[in-house]
Image (cartoon, grey):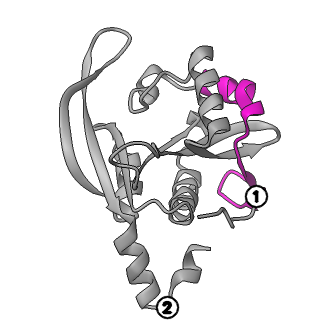
Amino acid sequence: MTNNRSYPRTVACAGGEVVFRLLTPDDGEAVLAFAQKLSAHDLLFLRRDISQPKVVAAWMDATRRGGITTVLAVRDGAVLGCATIVRDALSWSRHVGELRVILEPGSRGQGLGGQLTHEAFALAIELGVEKLMAQMTVDQRGAIGVFEGLGFRAEALLHDHVKDREGRTHDIVILAHDVAKFQAQMAAYGLTEALE
């Protein structure tokens, strides 16, 4: 599928207007500056530590190759958050996308996370993703609530699955959403324009 969503786009949230735009491989420095504002605990539900320059470089390379699609939330040139859809076209799970959403601490509690998650969800449908997965530590209740509000449901709990910088282990919850079923239901009710 092709991307028909329009970017950049300005959206309103409690903290003021924010621009949603697609990440480009030239955004490495801005993403690194954003990531370095995040706590070590915030980074635990991501597969890699994006506060490290070599990890951001790999992210930009994967973006260039098309395996990762990221929507940035930007205000006054600074990245406030991002929503990423990761797909592996060569795997047995090529119909599955992993959704990763993270905000800098000062932008939380203003509705931006929900808007960014909704945006990524709609983009995943356009990209042809049939199932979306998300993972986070079990104590990230706000994030879990946002995903559950979109229809994600817990599929797995992985005990002691990640280890923080101090060597403490944390449980990860895996949430999933059947995007293809959702899209079919929306089409059946004539509501597909609600995702535009």
* Figure quadrant of the C terminus: bottom right
Label 1 belongs to which residue?
A: 7
Q: Earlier in the sequence, mark 2 or mark 1?
A: 1
Q: Nearer the viewer, residue 131 or 2?
A: 2
Q: Is residue 23 magenta?
A: yes
Q: Is residue 192 visible?
A: yes
Q: Amino acid at mark 2?
A: Gly
Query: Quick one: SS at disc 2?
Result: loop
Query: Quick one: SS at disc 1?
Result: loop
Determine which quarter of the picture holds residue 42. Answer: top left
> How many residues crowd around disc 2 within 10 Å: few (fewer than 14), some, or many (20 or more)?
few
Residue span colored magenta: 8-36
Rendering coords of residue 195 (x, y %):
56, 73
Left or right: 173 as drawn, with respect to 136: left
Which residue is found at the position 71% from the left and 27% from the top?
A: 28
> How many residues crowd around disc 1 within 10 Å: few (fewer than 14), some, or many (20 or more)?
few
Determine which quarter of the picture holds residue 61. Answer: top right
Q: How many marks?
A: 2
* Figure quadrant of the N terminus: bottom right
Label 2 belongs to which residue?
A: 190
Q: Nearer the viewer, residue 108 or 98?
A: 98
Are the residues flagged by discs 2 and 1 in contact, CB closer than 8 Å? no
Tag on residue 130?
none
